[in-house]
């Protein structure tokens, strides 16, 4: 009996114990942020994914102390200059106002534009999180605001931000 087992094991590379399936309370089809509401999940995603660093003026340079949340994500005129020219973090409140939730998911899933927008990591978010961010941005109070400045081609010096 033992000998048979050893022989089968030798022929068969799969002699390790089968991995145990761990059931958890929050098991879902795709990774997602769990929170008390979609809006809270979106808020958490935005607050921990760096979106404000480029899409909210003053946020990065005040270490997150300014501006208040009611002014988040209205776009920034702080220039990001490199070989691509100069880009500006767009007004995401405007983007959600102009797109349906499905269009937003499509944009975040296929988006590609000037650096330093971190498209690779945003594209890899689950649809759950993309939808949560959309709902959160829509819930933000206050005016939608103006578009941020248009990008500049390489070689053009941006006006001071
Ligand atoms: C390091 C800076 C940076 C960070 C961090 C960043 N963005 Fe951006 N994002 C940009 C810039 C710059 C653009 C505009 C690029 C251009 O003009 O081509 C942009 C564009 C976008 C657009 C396209 C908007 C439109 O109307 O076309 C979306 C959507 C977007 N960002 C979402 C996000 C989200 C969501 C996060 C956080 C998970 C995030 N960004 C984090 C810099 C950043």
Image (cartoon, rainbow, N blue to C red):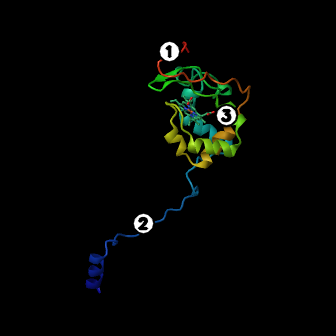
Residue 141 in the image: x percent, y percent?
73, 29
Residue 83 shows in this picture: yes
Which residue is located at x 57 percent, y 48 percent?
Answer: 126
Q: Between residue 89 and residue 50, name the one nearer to us.
A: 89
Which residue is located at x 54 percent, y 43 percent?
Answer: 123
SS at circle 2: loop
Does the Cβ of the disc 3 residue fall within 8 Å of ligand 1? Answer: yes
Nearest to the eye among marks 1 and 2: give it. 1
Q: Quadrant of residue 56?
A: top right
SS at circle 3: helix
Q: Mark 1 points at which residue?
A: 157
Residue 137 in the image: x percent, y percent?
67, 35
Residue at far bottom of view: 1
Disc 1 versus disc 3: distance between alpha carbons? 27 Å
Which residue is located at x 52 percent, y 33 percent?
Answer: 117
Where is 124 relative to 22, above or below? above
Sequence order check: which comes first, mark 2 or mark 3? 2
Q: Mark 3 points at which residue?
A: 95
């Amino acid at each position: 009996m033992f000998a048979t087992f050893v022989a089968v094991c030798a022929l068969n590379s799969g002699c390790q114990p089968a991995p145990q399936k761990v059931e958890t309370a929050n098991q879902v089809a795709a990774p997602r942020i769990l929170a008390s509401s979609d809006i809270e999940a979106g808020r958490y995603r935005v607050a921990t994914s760096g979106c404000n660093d480029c899409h909210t003026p003053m946020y990065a340079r005040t270490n997150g102390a300014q501006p208040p949340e009611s002014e988040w994500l209205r776009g920034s005129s702080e220039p990001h200059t490199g070989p691509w020219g100069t880009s500006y973090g767009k007004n995401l409140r405007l983007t959600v106002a102009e797109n349906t939730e499905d269009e937003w998911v499509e944009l975040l899933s296929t988006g590609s534009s000037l650096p330093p927008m971190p498209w690779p990591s945003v594209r890899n978010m689950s649809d759950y999180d993309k939808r949560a961010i959309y709902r959160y941005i829509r819930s933000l109070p206050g005016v939608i605001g103006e578009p941020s400045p248009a990008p500049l081609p390489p070689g053009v010096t941006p006006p001071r931000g």
